[in-house]
Amino acid sequence: MREEPKGAGSREKLLRAARRAVIKVGTSTVTGADGKLCAERVKPIVKSIAELMKSGRQVVLVSSGAVGLGRGWIGLHRSRLSDMVTKQACAAVGQSLLMNAYKAMFAVWGVKIAQVLLTEDDFTNWRRYSNLRQTMEKLLGFGVLPIVNENDTVSTAELESVGTESRSPVFSDNDRLAALVMSGLEADALVLLTDVAGLLRDVSRAAAHESNSNGESDVIAVVEKITPELKSLAAGPSTGGRGGMQTKLDAAEIAMNCGGTAVIANGNDGKTLDRIFAGEKVGTVFLPSQRMKGKRRWIAYAADVRGRVVVDDGAQRAIAHGKASLLSSGIVRVENHFVPMDVVSIVDLGGKEFARGIANCTSEEAEERANSKGEATGKRSGTKSRVVFTRDNIVLFEQS
């Protein structure tokens, strides 16, 4: 990795020009060791957001901290949050505390806020996803600041440990939630405020959360591409939160692939947001790589993947390099049930996912057509090959 990549000069231009931004603050920034809201850290962030809005920018705030605040208010020790129902009860108590605190702090600067509590279904269902975008657009048009969090009281996707289900959750933390909000709103920038100065070269320092201005020399300033080597630098979950540097890299990658700029920076420094949008060298900046259209972004990142089809080498080449649709004749086998308009994973013979698409038929129909090719040769078969995924509804993933 280079100290200053070729695109480093884009940092100032991109962030100074950003007109719409999603800013995420983590639990370690919002709450203190006593389980109460840390006004010392949050008030400067509130002030910076208010000033960004006064300058004509549109901002969405994604805020963690509800569970931690609820736990502190009820008087529970962290060790007593092992069961799901207790976590949800804490979220129910803490969410109102969080919003009341934000309402009071933003009122000082004349900013009106709106609470937006989301679940996975708000992203995985295309109609709800579209409705969510329209509502958020209306709030931004009114000059209101949407404050977003997962609805932990009724949804368990974020509270559960990642990997406990056969299906991967669309978002298991507020980092990815913020990235999906950024994607849906086609925002220019995603800022992830945490308790470290950015992505650090030294894993031991990242794990120890040695995050102060003196540690900025250890920060990777600009990232043009997220590589396996870069991911190896990520530490585990942060203290008090459910995310960590790995989830922030995942969120940054979504932002980059949606044509946006992402920043990971220290939220404990009251001047961080001001410096970021002034284009100063602070934190780690992830430069945009491409911009997918809205429906394609939804297929790639937000949609609930319902099934899987394994394709032969010829079909893989036709999709990956020939910009072709997927015909049933290229399918080797169908795994798991799906119906028309479901998003389905497309994998090669080795089981590696290289694309996703919206199905035109049911899994039974796709399997029936695929099986018929082995029962009769082309001329003698009365069964025509069917288009299972049209090219316009297929999204390719970059292969590492």
Image (tube, rainbow, N blue to C red):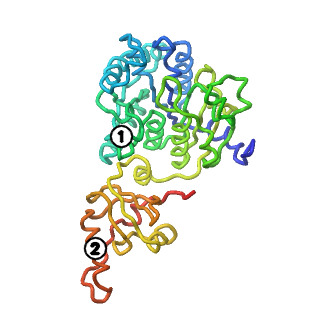
**What kind of residue is marked 2?**
Arg
Nearer to us in this view, 228 or 107: 228
Q: Is residue 357 left or right of residue 220?
A: left
Nearer to us in this view, 136 or 319: 319
Mark 1 residue crowding within 10 angstroms, few (<14) / some (14–19) / many (20+) = some
In the rendered view, would you say 153 is above or below 96? below
What secondary structure is found at the residue carrying circle 2? helix
Say which residue appears at 45% left-offset and 20% top-offset: 111
Say which residue appears at 40% left-offset and 69% top-offset: 325
Say which residue appears at 36% left-offset and 26% top-offset: 115
**What kind of residue is marked 1?**
Gln
Tally the marks: 2
Residue bearing the label numbered 2 = 369
Residue 234 percent coordinates (x, y): 59, 38
Residue bearing the label numbered 1 = 134
Q: Is residue 366 left or right of residue 272?
A: left
Give the quadrant of residue 188. Answer: top right
Say which residue appears at 49% left-offset and 31% top-offset: 59
In the rendered view, would you say 134 is above or below 40? below
Nearer to us in this view, 175 or 156: 156
Residue 33 percent coordinates (x, y): 51, 14
Residue 389 is tagged as none
Residue 313 percent coordinates (x, y): 47, 72
Q: Is residue 40 left or right of residue 104?
A: right
